[in-house]
Image (cartoon, helix red, strand yellow):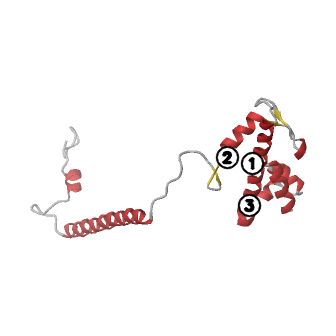
Amino acid sequence: MRVAFLDHLAATCNVAQSAAIANVSVETVYAHRRRDARFAEQWEAALALGYQMVETLLLGHVLAGNRAGDHVDTQQCEQPLIDFDAAMRLLAAHRKTDGKPRKGGPPLQFAASDETDAVLLKRLKVIEMRRAREAQVAAGTAGLLAQDAGAGDPVLARDAVIDHAPQAEGTRDGE
């Protein structure tokens, strides 16, 4: 199953056709690809061979003196005709960079480990400071709530806003 699928995939870059040749469903091959790292690598290698075949056909097409708008002759590989412009767009979209298909956007940049360590340590310090501040507030709040709420006792700011806020007209006690 694998050999037939991968051989046809390398020749056509067509997953559905390759699955049919191997007498399996498309879902099955995708499931194997997700679960089996070796099969996924072989799949990528087969696609890379397919792209090389398209590049070779296009190069031969141009070197034979054909125009860009002409269909590319694929009789030697027993494939349907290839539209030159579509093939060029396909190759441009899948140009290789460091052995991986390019997915678009600027090149990836990776931070050095000392840079990532510094960022992580800074974030951990912020978390530590926030937890210490929350612990202090919780300790202060517990102490204030434990006291009798007499006239001279301190009142939490949130309580002062809620309990001592001016009331709207007609909502005062006794009115």
- Reading the chain from its start, which is encountered first: label 1 or label 3? 3
Characterize the local packing of mark 1: few (<14), some (14-19) or many (20 or more) Cα atoms within 10 angstroms. many
Residue 40 in picture, x, y percent from top left: 72, 61
Residue pointed to by mark 3: 33
Query: Residue 111 at what x, y percent from top left?
Result: 45, 59
| Residue 116 placement (x, y as % from top left) | 42, 63
Nearer to me, 1 or 107: 107
The earlier-in-sequence mark between 2 and 1 is 1
Q: Residues within 10 Å of mark 3 (few under 14, many from 20)?
A: some
Q: Amino acid at mark 3?
A: Arg
Which quadrant of the figure has residue 70? top right
Residue nearest the viewer, comparing 175 with 50: 50
Q: Which residue is mark 1?
A: 51
Counting from the top left corner in percent of width and height, residue 67 is at: 78, 30
Choose mark 1 or mark 3, whichever is in front: 1
Quarter of the picture holding the C terminus: top left
CA gap, disc 2 and disc 1: 8 Å
Judge left or right: residue 29 versus residue 171.
right
Q: Which mark is residue 174?
A: none
The answer to whether the residue labelled 3 contacts the one labelled 2, judged by CB atoms less than 8 Å apart, is no
The kind of secondary structure element at disc 3 is helix
Q: Who's the residue at 71% across and 38% down the image?
A: 88
Q: Where does label 2 land, which residue?
A: 94
Q: Real-space Cα distance between discs 1 and 3? A: 19 Å
Q: Quadrant of the N terminus?
A: bottom right
Q: Are marks 2 and 1 in contact (CB under 8 Å)?
A: yes
User: Between tags 3 and 2, which lies in front?
Assistant: 2
Pick the front one: 160 or 84? 84
- At horizontal 87% and vertical 43% (from top left) the residue drawn is 79
Element under disc 1: helix
